[in-house]
Image: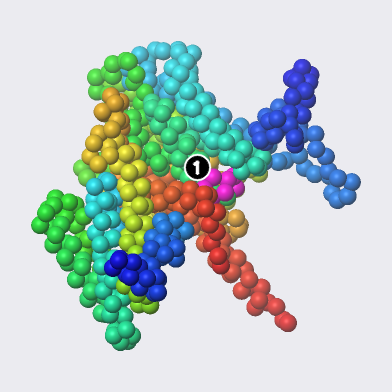
Amino acid sequence: MDFIKHQIEKIKPHFEKGGKWEKHYYSFEALETFLFAPATTNGIKGSQIRDAIDLKRLMMTVIISMVPCLLFGIWNVGHQHFLAIGQAGATLGEKFWVGAIQVLPVVVVSYGVGLGIEFVFATFRRHPVNEGFLVTGMLIPLVMPPDIPLWQVAVATVFAVIIGKEAFGGTGMNVVNIALTARAFLYFAYPTDISGDVWTYIGDGQAVAGFSGATPLSLAGDAATTGTNVVQSFNSFGAGWNEGVFTLSNLFMGIRPGSIGETSTLMCLIGAAILIATGAGSWKIIFSVFGGAYAMGLFLNLVGGNAYVEMPAHYHLVIGGLAFGAVFMATDPVTASQTETGKWVYGLLIGMFTVLIRVFNPAYPEGIMLAILLMNVFAPLIDYFVVSANKKRRLQRATV
Amino acid sequence: MSTAVAEVVEKKSEPLFSKKNKKLITNPLDIDNPITVQVLGVCSALAVTTQMKPALVMAIALTVVTASSNVIISMLRNTIPSRIRIIVQLAIVSLWVILVDQLLKAYSYDLWKQLSVYVGLIITNCIVMGRLEAFAMGNKPGPSLLDGIGNGLGYGMILLIVGFFRELFGGGSIFGFKVFEAVGVHYTGNGIMLLPAGACFIVGIVIWVQRTLNGHRETH
């Protein structure tokens, strides 16, 4: 450690004002503060006591809360792979190995490309490198299918960081969630690689007889046209090669095909617990997204119509990526509503739109991505109305 | 000898290509661009730019219509009663639009079908009406012609830039020529470029680059 610190101190003068690498000062500073605590201290005047929480620690908290999803996702990719090629007896290590080989390159590409762009923009715009990408770089892999082509991850990251963030002024200025921008980009640009039968990594293996890449969402979507009971088709799915993969308890556990990190509602809830306990995420948003989706599901049950509409409302909470979106995407403090009342409205509407898109728009099997992006855009409007209602209330109370 | 006399006459008024008049052509290409600065005519810029060819034809059509209507309105500008000037302008614009439309229909039917209603909609294009109101109604035919050509070119330039990137990234070709296959690379078309949203992104990036280069700032 001392050696590294010594080396950094030695090259530091080159990056400071007048040094030969002056232009790259902020890249240097980012690496230095990443390795060691910043040496700057408060001045003599003003506040001397501050909490150690800064953007970096906040971001790391969110990343820690995503670790359960990531680890489970890695195992699950391997698990589904071996089930699909008919080798259910594979060991835990083998499953992790296959999963890691599929997942870690996506993580590396996402971080490499995204941080590269951050550094380039920081150098040109002469501002410190922001930590904003730390979370985004982990979120992007978690919402990708396991065998997404790596170049697509790179292109999507470039698009999301430049158009979604830097065009609006960098970290903290973005209007829509960056990780979801990346996913939405792929969804519209290369739909064949991110929808349909892409959720199980098969690789060189041969899929077993009777294998089907269908997801709960696509089964439920089919049910709307065929009229079969959704719960029945969930329970009977996978007979012969992956018995009971879509039973309610299994859907909650998340041992099913899907995007790398989204499958397990349980792991998302563990993440939610960490976020809420550390205060990094708003429990109001998480709670109201689930509540909105459940309420909309119940309402649709009452109205009736087709088999999908009549699917029990609690199934909406465990299929697709609703839990992951509610916990990690909707709570993004930059793009969510800022007012406390606004958070309830924002979350409820995300949940309701998710279920509406799922049930009534067969072109978009999963609604959470589009619902969150839509509400990101409306979040400032919600805040505006909450604030002006507050002003009105206080004006009425005023006696002057 | 006669040319010398003519030159003198020209100078007495103002030469057609004076410094001021040259600006009429160059300004719309950069600091006064109808699409990226005035944000007019965006609708057709999103609609016809999935490929270069329709974009080029559309650009030519709009340039012809704007320039010719500008000249005619400018010649009539002192006789048009101001209360009915809009309907007079519309009548003249539609004359040119119908001419262009019929020409396209006669000589390149496929392109005409591809452009569908957008040639006809030049009548309502804000750029044409805007130039008539803002320039031709108060200036002589010569400068009006230049102004019309300039704005048509400014519009066409953006159309071609947007069309270039949309066709290149969306279908891997330029003017229908498969660029990537010609060099032996397999190219997967980017679907977002074929959607109107793709054009929005590219227009946005063009505005970003343009304002970075010329330092333009919105004035409030």
Q: In which quadrant of the rendered image does the N terminus of chain B lie?
A: bottom left
The residue singled out by tag 1 in the image is A162
User: Is residue B110 part of the magenta span, yes or no?
Assistant: no
Residue type, label 1 = Ile
User: Is residue A167 part of the magenta span, yes or no?
Assistant: yes
Regarding residue A340, the answer to whether it shows in the image is yes
B60 on left or right of A278:
left
Extent of the magenta region: A166-172
Regarding residue A278, the answer to whether it shows in the image is no
Residue at 30%, 21% in the rendered image: A241
B168 on left or right of A400:
left
Report x, y in % for residue A183: 42, 39
In front: A275, or B5? Answer: B5
Q: In which quadrant of the rendered image does the C terminus of chain B lie?
A: bottom right
- In the displayed structure, A319 sits above or below A206; it is below
Residue at 29%, 26% in the rendered image: B183
In front: A350, or A316? Answer: A350
Residue at 58%, 69% in the rendered image: A389
Q: Secondary structure at mark 1?
A: helix
- In the displayed structure, A385 sits above or below B91; it is above
